[in-house]
Amino acid sequence: MTAAIEEEKDAKFTGSETEGGITSSYAIEDGVKLKVAYSFFGSIYDEDERAMIEKALGQDTLTMGPLTTEFQDAFAKKHGVKHAFACSNCTTGMHLAMQVMGVREGDEVIVTPNTFIATSLVVLKQKAIPVYADIDPRTFNIDPKQIAKKITPKTKAISVVHYGGQMCDMDPIMDLARKHGLLVLEDCAHAHNAAYKGRKAGSVGDIGAFSFHSLKNMTTCGEGGMLTTNRDEWTKKIEMLRCMNLTHWDPARKAWAWGGMSIEKTDPVQYWIPSHFDIDDVDGEWGNNYRMNEVQAGVGLAQLRKLDRLSEKRREIGRKITEGISGIKGITPVYEDPNGEHVYHLYTLCVEEEELGAGRDEFLLTLYRDFGVQGILHYQPTYHFTGLRKLGRYADNECPIAEKFFYKRELNLPMHPRLTDADIETMCAGIRGAAEKVRR
Ligand SMILES: Cc1ncc(COP(=O)(O)O)c(C=O)c1O
C-alpha cells in the first residue's frame, strides 16, 4: 500500500463514523460536555478474549468447530439447562424458536410491549399475531394476570422478556402455559446469569434465547446469540433449522444411480458417496444459516468465565446508584424483586411528574445538558411503531401501564461494568441536581 493510500484510509476512520443507526453511538456534536456517556459496549475485554481470538484463528475451521461445542456446553451448564445452541444473534435464535414451537400463520403469541422490536418481529415473520399483555408496574415485566386475560383458542405461545436483567414471575406464567397447552419462549437478551427462585434465565420456559450484541452483559465481538432448552425432542430440529435443513444421509436409504454408478448404501470410507448430507423439512419449515463462528465462540468462552464477576459488578453498581438517589422526591429507583437475582442490564429510574412538578422529558434533557449524564429510553410500547399500527389491530392505549405509567416516566442511565465510583457519583449528583433544577 502506498503512503498516500494509507493516509487516505486513516483519514476515513476517525472513529466518529459508525454504521448501524441505533446500535452504533448516541454521541452527537451539540456542544454538551458529556461526563458519563451512554456506552455501547456492555462488557470488559482483556487478554483472555484476545487469546481466544488467536486460538480460533489458528484452527483449521472457523465455524461450528470445537470452540462452538465447548461454548455451548459451558453455557448450558452455567444456565442449568440440558442443551444450548450458539447462533448468529438473538433475533435469528428467536425466529428459529418460533419455528420449532410450531408457531404458524394466524396463530397468536402473547408478548410484552416493553421490549425491543425483535420480540414481536419473529412472531410477524411467521405470519402469526403478536398479542400484547400489559406489564407489572414494579418490575416492568409482563404481568401473568394480564397474560391470562389475553389467552384465546388461537394462542400458541407466550414470549416473555426478562426486562433490564430481572426475571419475570415465571411460576404463574408456566402454570398458565401448562393449563392451556401453550409453549413459553424466554427472551433472555437482558438476562445472562439472572435467576428466579434459584433457577437461571433460559432454563424455566420451553426455550430461551440470549443475545451477545455489543451492549449486552456478555458479548461475542458485537453480535451473537444462544438458544437453550431442556427438550431433547427439539435438538435435532434446532440443529437443522440453524443450518439450512441439513441432516445426515440415512445409510439405509437406497441411493440412486449417480454418475453411472449404482450405489446401494453409504460407504463409511467413501463418505461423500452418495451424498455428504441430506436435506429435509422440519415440520414443514425451512431453515436458514443462523450459525455462529469460532472467533465469536472463543470470545464467548472467555466472557462466560468472567460472567459471575461481570454480573456482580453490575449489581454492585446498580445498588450504589439506588443508594445514591434514594430519597430524592420525585425520582423512583429500581425495584429488586426478592424472588430473583437482578443482573442490571439496564438501570431504569422513573420520574414522578406530580411529585417533581416537571415531566420526564424535561428532567432527561436537564440531566444531559446541564449535568452531562446521557440517558436513553427503553422501550416505547412495540405497538406504537408505524408498521404495527398499519396492522390495524391495536388500540392506542392497548397496554395502559406500559404506555402511560411506564413509558412516560422511565429513563435509562448509563450502565456497564466499567463505570467507576467517580462515574456513579457524577450520575447521582447529576440526578439530584437536575431534580432540584426542574422542581416546581
Ligand atoms: C429484549 C431484546 N430481545 C432481543 C434482542 C435482539 O438481540 P440481537 O441483537 O442479538 O438479535 C434485543 C437486542 O437489543 C433485546 O434487547
Image (cartoon, rainbow, N blue to C red):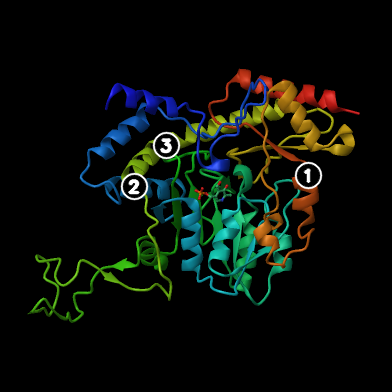
Q: Quadrant of residue 434?
A: top right
- Badge 1 crowding class, 10 Å Cα cut-off, few under 14, some 14 to 19, many 20 or more, is some
- Badge 3 crowding class, 10 Å Cα cut-off, few under 14, some 14 to 19, many 20 or more, is many
Q: Nearer the viewer, mark 3 or mark 1?
A: 1
Sequence-wise, which precedes: disc 2 or disc 3? 2
Q: From the image, which quarter does the N terminus lie in?
A: top left
Sequence-wise, which precedes: disc 1 or disc 2? 2
The tag on residue 5 is none
Q: From the image, which quarter does the C terminus lie in?
A: top right
Q: Residue at x 76, y 57 (%)?
A: 399
Residue extending farthest front: 4
The tag on residue 408 is 1
Sequence-wise, which precedes: disc 3 or disc 1? 3
Q: Residue at x 36, y 27 (%)?
A: 47
Position in image of residue 284 (x %, y %): 43, 76
Tell whether label 2 touches label 1 (CB within 8 Å): no
Residue extending farthest top: 422
In-front residue for pair 122/317:
122
How far apart in space, not on screen, are marks 1 and 2 (Cα)?
A: 41 Å
Residue extending farthest right: 440
Per the image, the residue denoted by label 3 is 303
Asked if 345 appears above or below 365 in the picture, the reply is below
Position in image of residue 186 (x %, y %): 55, 56
Tell whether label 3 touches label 2 (CB within 8 Å): no
Per the image, the residue denoted by label 2 is 293
How far apart in space, not on screen, are marks 2 and 3 (Cα)?
A: 15 Å
